[in-house]
Each structure stands twice: as C-alpha cells, then as structure tokens.
Amino acid sequence: MIKRMGFMGVVAFTIAMSISYAGVPILPPSMQPTQPLLVVGHLDAWDKTTGIAIVLGQKIHVPANASFSPYLVVGVFGTILPDGSVNASTVEGGSLYLAGSTPVYLTGVVTQSNPAIGQITIEGVKIDITQTLSITNGITPAAGSVVQLAGIQPLEGGIILAGDIRIGAAQIAANPLINSLPPTGWALAGTGITGSGRSPPAN
C-alpha cells in the first residue's frame, strides 16, 4: 500500500522550455533535464515497492532508486502519460515545504471543470482558479484542457489556490509560468535522483 504522509493530462505532453527564472537556471547547467518541470509541491504519499509517488495529487512513476523526504519540496520533471499520470525522468528535493507559504506548481490535464464555482480538478487535486479569472477573461478551462498553474496549498493534500494560470499548449509554450516564478522558493539544486521512470504495465 502507499504510505501516506498527509492527505492523499490525458495525452502524452511535453513542453520544450528553459527551466529558468529571468534567465537564471533553477538547476545547474550540468543537471538541466531534457524534459520539463511538471510538478512542484508536497509529497503526499509514496509506495517504494511499486515506484509510485503522489505529489500534489498527481500519480508519479519514479525511478527505482528514488528517495524522498516528506518535509521537503519535491520537483518532478518528466512526461504526462495517456492515463494522466507522470513518468518522471528526474525528481529533485528542495527546500523545507511550508503549507500555505511555499509556492506550488503544476502542469497537467483538467479532469473535471466547474465554472459555476471557478474550480477545476487535475487528477487527485482540486484547484480554485477564481483569482485567475481576470487573467483568463473569465474563462474556466474545460475538461481535457492542458493547463499550467502556480499558487499555494493552504493544507497538505487540500485544495490549491491558483494565483496564475496558462491554458492550452500554445499559451504555455509561448509564455511558460516557470519564467515568472522565483527559484529561491524551492531551492531545487541537485539533491534528488535521475533515471528512467516506471511506466504503468501494459493493459
């Protein structure tokens, strides 16, 4: 079973972008991954025997030699699989995670959308996007949309309060959110592991 440490996109999706803030790399050049940063947040759960971790409600297939701390920020680089889970190529540990203070970041596919209350769901996490409606001209992304968002999560495993968002692959590629987020909030600096993620078994 997955060991819980709190509460616990439908197409393969990769965005070619520089993992940097204002031109300053978040990771040293020698560690720049070839796949994008998809998730940054709290480790909700981890099953070492199956190689499955849950970060920000997202199922992550992690490399076999993965090692996590439930107290640190976790950054996941990789590819979104057809079932919505993430195949991690690189997983990085960062600074101490403080719920409601540490910024969280997520790129994924909307699985549920509720425009009436300004809320979407991406896999295992609900996101309140009401603060971003002025950015999107009142548009709530529909189910199946690829989105990239940043915000805070007041309670570990709880709802994310999004402060900024990008909707659609074209918008994300043209103006990736990562470029406006300060890396000092995460300190992803080569403390993690690199390897091939574990893809789910074929049906």
Image (cartoon, rainbow, N blue to C red):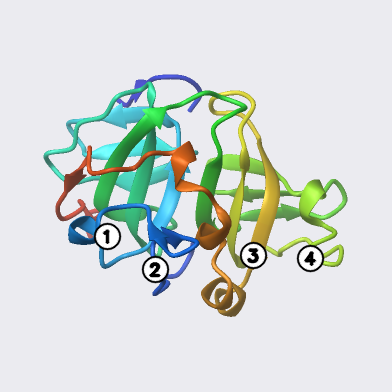
Question: In the figure, 97 relative to 177: above or below?
Answer: above
Q: Residue at x 13, y 42 (%)?
A: 64
Residue 5: give x, y in percent of width and height. 40, 19
In primary-sequence order, the first of circles 4 and 2 is 2
Element type at mark 4: loop
Depth-wise, is mark 3 or mark 2 nearer the camera?
2
Element type at mark 1: loop
* Residue 136: numbered disc: 4
Depth-wise, is mark 1 or mark 4 nearer the camera?
4
Residue 122: give x, y in percent of width and height. 57, 50
In primary-sequence order, the first of circles 4 and 3 is 4
The quadrant the N terminus occupies is: top left
Element type at mark 3: strand
Residue 80: give x, y in percent of width and height. 39, 61
Element type at mark 2: loop
Q: 10 Å neighbourhood of mark 2: few (<14), some, or many (≥20)?
A: some
CB atoms of marks 1 and 3 within 8 Å: no
Q: Which residue is mark 2?
A: 18
Asked whether residue 123 is in view, the answer is no
In primary-sequence order, the first of circles 1 and 3 is 3
Q: Residue at x 60, y 58 (%)?
A: 110
Gap in angstroms between the C-alphas marked 3 and 2: 16 Å
Q: Residue at x 21, y 53 (%)?
A: 197
Q: Residue at x 39, y 57 (%)?
A: 37
In primary-sequence order, the first of circles 3 and 2 is 2
Q: Which residue is mark 3?
A: 166
